[in-house]
Amino acid sequence: MNDSEFSELGPDRSLLLVDDDAPFLTRLARAMEKRGFIVETAESVAAGRAAANLRPPAYAVIDLRLEDGNGLDVVEALRDRRPECRIVVLTGYGAIATAVAAVKFGATDYLSKPADANDIASALLSRGEALPPPENLMSADRVRWEHIQRVYELCDRNVSETARRLSMHRRTLQRILAKRSPK
């Protein structure tokens, strides 16, 4: 992060990250700390709402679908406690309807997973201007592979359960998992 971006953060650099994907949350927290944010994390709607009520941050990145509910509940709590908070909603299930709902609830921006830290930081710091498209777009094969890996991890690396949730034959899934990730 260069000095001009760091100065864009302003005096309050507090950032709340809410996501139930623990490895993603840890990686994103480290990446955002390197960009000058003071990060607090939460892995559920309840923990996110508690953090929003106790210490409302200047910035927030919230996953839309959490194990214990909808991330929009955290967005709503943040808007009640700190209306000027810049909020980015993340989701692995990008759709126009959910984007509209997120913005209506008070989100500043909406990004589909997998989003990298640069895209998230840019969305948090943008002041209404259109962002340039990402430079390193993932191929459709890579997005599919990332989704399969995420579901596989959520199923505690159980191939049968993952195949059932993805409506995929178990043997097909095993072949996909045995291959290297696409570019």
Image (tube, rainbow, N blue to C red):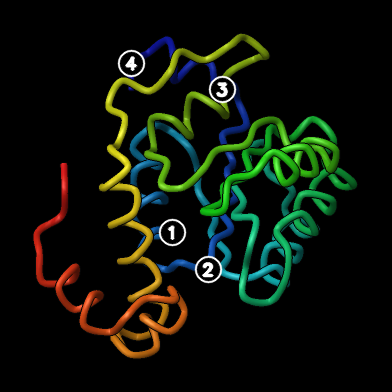
CA separation in Å, label 4 and label 1: 23 Å
Q: Pointer 2: residues within 10 angstroms few (<14), some, or many (20+)?
A: some
- How far apart marks 2 and 3 lie (CA) works out to 24 Å
Q: Earlier in the sequence, mark 4 or mark 1?
A: 4
Q: Earlier in the sequence, mark 2 or mark 1?
A: 2
Say whether disc 1 or disc 3 marks the residue closer to the N-terminus.
1
Circle 2 is placed at which residue position?
A: 20
Question: Mark 4: few, some, or many residues within 10 Å (few <14, many ≥20)?
Answer: few
Residue beneath disc 1: 25
Q: Residue at x 16, y 48 (%)?
A: 182
Instruction: Tell me which amino acid carries mark 3.
Output: Leu
SS at mark 2?
loop
Q: Are marks 1 and 3 in contact (CB under 8 Å)?
A: no
Marks 2/1 in contact by CB < 8 Å: the verdict is: yes
CA distance for labels 2 and 4: 30 Å
120 with respect to 155 (left or right):
right
Q: Which mark is residue 144?
A: none
Label 3, on which residue? 125
Q: Which of the pair 181/173 is nearer the observer?
A: 173
Residue type indicated by callout 4 = Asn
Residue pictured at 37% horizontal, 39% vertical = 116
Q: Position of residue 44 (x, y in %)?
A: 63, 70
The local secondary structure at tag 1 comes to: helix
> Which badge, 4 or 3, is on the more N-terminal residue?
4
Callouts 2 and 4 close, C-beta under 8 Å: no
Rendered position, 168 above or below 32: below
Nearest to viewer (mark 4 / mark 1): 1
